[in-house]
């Protein structure tokens, strides 16, 4: 099979114009080593384009990039941006800080050279900022090359092997470095047979990717198969307490580090959706994770162990089993049992990356465990990169959530202060070999923003959006683009599953409406709609008891419909259609109103995008135009199926008399 790569790859947020301010100046870089060489090459490229001087003597320089005299004890990612005399200066804590400082100057443009620039210290809130690719080496018969990928094939792998040309991987590393991301996992958490071999006999391919990412300060991680010692044929068991197994992992890991000295660590999906794990041997998740941690510890690297463990063969007739409870039930009792280099990686919500979920209580239930939050940039349940859906407002809500109530620290602070090395944010990547990287060109904003939020979780998503627009579309009317995208997550929510109930998607691929698609399946994702009402009773008084997994005051807030936020009402409660929301409207009328409004907003987005023709690169404009047509078709389909379904179930007409089929 031949590799086809498009000759025209979109520059995303690093078009040549982004380097104008830097490239037209006299620049001095005072550092040596591989990352400093990358910085120097970036400066040289920019100056060649815009007439600046890339090797100015320091006394004449407009910009000086240098390392701090005393190296910092931290990650080395931080830097000071300041004005000294007539020059702007970046004083970096370490080589990576030099690179981040360079990209801060790029982002600022002319403003980086303002004579009154005040001293600014920049440092990431979270130490490990990692994108997890769900890329398969082989083309999986159901999932294809990239599981839940909506942007073409993998940029790493092509039909069973490493791509010959890794130019795009290098470009990708550059784009990521400019957002603050510092690690990438190059294979799917569902580790099939070929991918299991990446750890051993196919490690050379992994090393080639690592070398390509390295110049931009991106470290490589691998998703591993817990049963690797068995699958690779070396041992009859993968029991984590068996000495032979422990030795196998130690020796295998030593070989990984001998080949890739800056290898980042392992990612593991165990005992989940059919993946092997310690349960097979009657062992706990702590036993499994600690075994891998022991193999990684001499190399000072972590294992990220996913908490996404639940029964995917549930009986839909059994209303007492609650998938939302599963991760907490499995993991909270293990608090204190994990080694120091185990990071428990927890999806941000208790279910599965739905458009609206409460924050997973596991994220703050384990004070003696290193915990990471996992976000999903790939739009599995949020429009599959055919719909505009700017996700950072949702992510910010998660990071700003205060587990102890309104006065305690936000989740992001807890994740960073508790953890040596400054916490972890991981996110499932949305990139493929598509010329626009993300299928939908506007989905690039989600990728850009996840890096920016991992660096600085308190930043306003709207400001990040403006930053992205300014870099990516320097000639487009910024406000018009901003208005089109800023609330697109809320628009998407309006025309899909209501009030936090989730799913209602087509089973398997998860695109488009199917209200009962998962209702009588083993997956544990139900809405329980009947003629009287809808929603899942997760209260402690009468339901599954999920609310009791939250600390005070959230357990009480969620327990009562009187205090539960409207947008999560059906996640926590089964209520009659006539239940009146805090907004003053009934549940059924809310369903009708939001579904009509959501589809109308998409029609409006499409019209506004059409008006932007001529201000946006024609290829981008055409691609987005095509996607918006599909988004409108899909939004209308959602609107009609949901409204009709609930009209038929409830028998209650729309108070405004609109057409329900
Ligand atoms: C979802 C998704 C799967 C994925 C899983 C996971 O269920 O649909 O494709 O493997 O999450 O996060 O492991």
Image (cartoon, grey):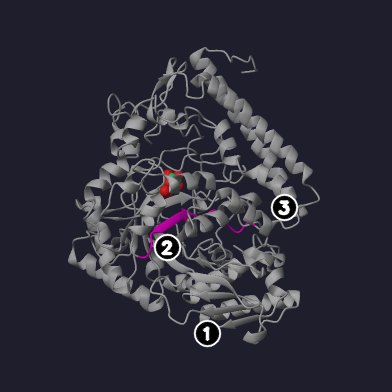
Residue identifier under label 1: 32
How far apart marks 1 and 2 lie (CA) works out to 24 Å
The picture places residue 615, in percent across and down from the top left corner, at 78, 52
Task: Answer with left or right where residue 289 lies relative to residue 66.
Answer: left
The picture places residue 154, in percent across and down from the top left corner, at 55, 59
Q: Check if mark 3's residue and mark 2's residue have beta carbons within 8 Å.
A: no
Question: Magenta span has 217?
Answer: no
Q: Is mark 1 within 8 Å of ligand 1?
A: no
Determine which quarter of the picture holds residue 201.
Answer: bottom left
User: Which residues lie in the magenta part?
Assistant: 421-434
Q: Is residue 655 above or below residue 116?
A: above
Determine which quarter of the picture holds residue 634.
Answer: top right
Residue identifier under label 2: 128
Question: Magenta span has 423?
Answer: yes
The rendered magenta stretch, by its main secondary structure, is classed as: loop
How far apart marks 1 and 3 lie (CA) works out to 39 Å
User: Counting other residues with Cα less than 10 Å from the Cα at mark 2, is it few (<14), some (14-19), or many (20 or more)?
Assistant: many
Which tag, 3 or 2, sits closer to the chain's start? 2
């Amino acid at each position: 099979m031949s590799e086809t790569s498009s000759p025209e790859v979109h520059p995303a947020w690093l078009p040549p114009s982004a380097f104008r301010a830097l490239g037209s100046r006299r620049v001095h870089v005072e550092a040596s080593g591989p990352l400093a060489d990358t910085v120097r090459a970036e400066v040289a490229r920019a100056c060649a384009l815009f007439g600046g001087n890339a090797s100015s003597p320091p006394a004449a320089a407009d910009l000086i990039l240098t390392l701090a005299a005393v190296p910092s004890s931290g990650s080395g990612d931080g830097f000071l941006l300041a004005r000294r005399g007539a020059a702007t200066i970046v004083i970096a804590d370490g080589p990576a800080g030099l690179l981040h400082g360079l990209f801060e100057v790029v982002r600022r443009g002319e403003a980086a050279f303002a004579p009154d620039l005040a001293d600014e210290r920049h440092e990431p809130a979270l130490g490990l900022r990692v994108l997890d690719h769900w890329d398969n080496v082989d083309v999986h018969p159901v999932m294809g090359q990239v599981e839940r990928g909506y942007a073409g094939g993998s940029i790493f792998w092509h039909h069973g092997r490493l791509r010959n040309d890794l130019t795009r991987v290098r470009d990708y590393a550059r784009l990521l470095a400019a957002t603050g991301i510092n690690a990438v996992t190059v294979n799917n958490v569902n580790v099939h047979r070929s991918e299991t071999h990446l750890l051993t006999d196919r490690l050379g391919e992994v090393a080639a990717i690592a070398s390509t990412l390295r110049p931009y300060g991106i470290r490589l991680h691998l998703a591993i198969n817990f049963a690797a010692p068995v699958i690779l044929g070396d041992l009859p068991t993968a029991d984590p307490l068996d000495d032979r197994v422990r030795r196998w992992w130690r020796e295998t890991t030593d070989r990984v580090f001998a080949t890739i000295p800056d290898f980042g660590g392992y990612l593991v999906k165990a005992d989940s959706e059919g993946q092997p794990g310690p349960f097979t041997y009657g062992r706990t998740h702590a036993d499994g994770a600690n075994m891998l941690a022991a193999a990684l510890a001499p190399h000072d690297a972590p294992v990220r162990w996913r908490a996404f463990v639940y029964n995917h063969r549930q009986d839909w007739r059994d209303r007492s089993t609650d998938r939302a409870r599963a991760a907490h039930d499995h993991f909270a009792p293990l608090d204190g049992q994990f080694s120091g280099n185990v990071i428990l990686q927890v999806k941000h919500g208790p279910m599965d990356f739905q458009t609206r979920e409460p924050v997973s209580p596991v994220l703050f239930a384990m004070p003696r465990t290193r915990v990471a939050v996992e976000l999903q940039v790939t739009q599995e349940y949020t429009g599959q990169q055919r719909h505009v859906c700017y996700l950072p407002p949702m992510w910010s809500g998660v990071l700003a959530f205060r587990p102890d109530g309104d006065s305690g620290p936000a989740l992001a602070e807890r994740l960073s202060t508790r953890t040596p090395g400054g916490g972890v944010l991981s996110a499932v990547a949305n990139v493929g070999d598509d010329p626009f990287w993300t299928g939908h060109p506007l989905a690039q904003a989600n990728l850009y923003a996840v890096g920016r939020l991992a660096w600085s979780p308190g930043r306003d998503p709207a400001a990040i959006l403006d930053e992205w627009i300014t870099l990516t579309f320097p000639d487009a009317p910024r406000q018009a683009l901003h208005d089109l995208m800023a609330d697109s997550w809320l628009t998407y929510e309006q025309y899909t599953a209501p009030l936090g109930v989730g799913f209602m998607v087509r089973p398997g691929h998860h695109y488009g409406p199917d209200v009962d698609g998962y209702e009588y399946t083993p997956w544990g994702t139900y809405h329980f709609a009947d003629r009287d009402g809808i929603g899942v009773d997760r209260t402690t008084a009468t339901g599954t008891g999920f609310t009791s997994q939250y600390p005070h005051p959230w357990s009480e807030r969620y327990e009562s419909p009187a205090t539960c936020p409207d947008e999560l009402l059906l996640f926590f409660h089964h209520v009659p259609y006539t239940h009146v929301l805090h907004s003053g409207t009934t549940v059924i009328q809310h369903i009708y109103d939001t579904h009509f409004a959501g589809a109308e907003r998409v029609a409006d987005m499409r019209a506004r995008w059409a008006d932007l023709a001529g201000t946006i690169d024609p290829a981008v404009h055409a691609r987005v135009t095509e996607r918006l047509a599909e988004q409108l078709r899909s939004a209308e389909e959602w609107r009609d199926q949901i409204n009709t379904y609930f009209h038929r179930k409830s028998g209650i007409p729309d108070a405004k008399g609109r057409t329900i089929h």
